[in-house]
């Protein structure tokens, strides 16, 4: 996958690009992207193409940036690209390029791969733009669980958001993640405990036994009770030792 600008910079004249496309050896995609093959575009190719369509100042953002950073288990219908205010905007069924005031030079990920915002920035915006509150919680939990960004860094980025209808809700999700919640089941458990006036448990507690090392999803020390939101290898051994 290359952009038309890259081809020109590499010394490939525009007439040569048109000739290769017309001959069926290359394939043009949207306005700025050319594939030097005629097969289907894989996900990474689509991510690169999205940044080409946004031109030089574009960055993958939100959930799309998280996917480019290695997030698994989540898909998007359209790839989100952010550009500064005043930049040209192009949208298609697969790519959504939008202007935003929130885009800052320090947001950019300096590593390899498609141009994108840093994972902690992407997590905050993905949660803000999520289709539902539950999807917002899922994106925060998955980012922390898959170690793309620690909850503390996500929290610092969230402080930059002054106004948004979902800000307070995401703040609770981040605080819960900082307390140890690393999955939707654990976030749901904490929310239900607070809703019913129950004490919030310790989370991700390490227990070492003769059978091995276990991570307890939740533990109430004062009640000598443990709970698994997703299960573990040999719960009976752990429970007996906790009791």
Image (cartoon, rainbow, N blue to C red):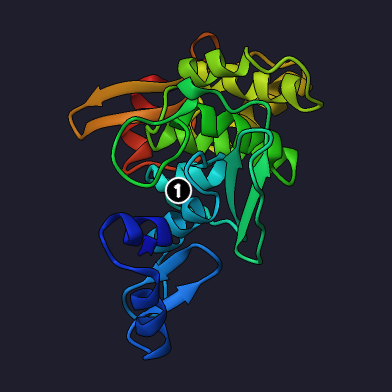
The C terminus - image quarter: top left
Location of residue 76 in the rendering, given as x and y in whole percent from the top left corner: 58, 56
- Name which quarter of the figure residue 129 lies in: top right
Q: Give the residue at x 45% y 39%.
A: 116
In the displayed structure, does residue 51 sit left or right of residue 93? left
Picture mark count: 1
Report the quarter where the N terminus lies: bottom left
Q: Nearer the viewer, residue 88 or 185?
A: 88
Q: Residue at x 67, y 19 (%)?
A: 172
- Residue reaching furthest bottom? 23
Residue 31 as seen in the image, left or right of residue 46: right
Residue 72 lies, with reference to residue 215, above or below; the image says: below
Rendered location of residue 114, percent (x, y)? 38, 47
Query: Compared to 195, does 74 lie above or below?
Result: below
Residue pictured at 55% horizontal, 49% vertical: 54
Reply above or below: 92 against 140.
Answer: below
Please report the residue visible at 59 percent of the width from the left and 49 percent of the height from the top: 80
Q: Secondary structure at mark 1?
A: helix
Seen in the image, is 53 located left or right of residue 40?
right
Residue furthest out toward the right: 165
Q: Position of residue 22 (x, y in %)?
A: 42, 88
Q: Is 168 left or right of 38, judged from the image as shown? A: right
Q: Residue furthest top?
A: 222
Locate residue 25: give its quadrant. bottom left
Q: Is residue 38 visible?
A: no
In front of the other: 184 or 112: 112
- Residue found at the very far left of the displayed protein: 210
Estimate the x, y position of residue 149 in percent, counting from the top left: 42, 27
Residue 107 appears in the figure: yes
Mark 1 surroundings: few (<14), some (14-19) or many (≥20) residues within 10 A: many
User: In this figure, which residue is indicated by the disc labeled 1?
Assistant: 67
């Amino acid at each position: 996958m290359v952009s038309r600008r890259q081809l020109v910079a590499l010394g490939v004249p525009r007439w040569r690009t048109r000739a290769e496309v017309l001959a069926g050896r290359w394939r043009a995609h949207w306005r700025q992207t050319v594939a030097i093959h005629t097969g289907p575009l894989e996900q990474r190719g689509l991510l690169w193409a999205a940044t080409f369509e946004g031109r030089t100042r574009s960055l993958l953002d939100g959930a799309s940036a998280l996917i480019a950073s290695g997030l698994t288990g989540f898909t998007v219908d359209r790839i989100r690209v952010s550009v500064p205010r005043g930049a040209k905007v192009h949208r298609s069924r697969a790519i959504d390029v939008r202007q935003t005031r929130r885009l800052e030079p320090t947001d950019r990920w300096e590593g390899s791969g498609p141009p994108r915002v840093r994972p902690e920035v992407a997590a905050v915006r993905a949660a803000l733009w999520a289709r539902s509150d539950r999807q917002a919680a899922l994106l925060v939990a998955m980012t922390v669980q898959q170690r793309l960004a620690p909850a503390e860094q996500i929290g610092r980025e969230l402080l930059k958001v002054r106004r948004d209808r979902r800000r307070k809700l995401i703040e609770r999700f981040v605080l819960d993640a900082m307390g140890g919640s690393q999955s939707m089941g654990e976030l749901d458990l904490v929310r239900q405990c607070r809703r019913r006036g129950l004490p919030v448990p310790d989370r991700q507690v390490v227990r070492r036994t003769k059978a091995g090392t276990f991570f307890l999803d939740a533990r109430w020390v004062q009640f000598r009770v443990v709970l698994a939101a997703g299960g573990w290898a040999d719960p009976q051994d752990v429970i007996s030792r906790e009791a």
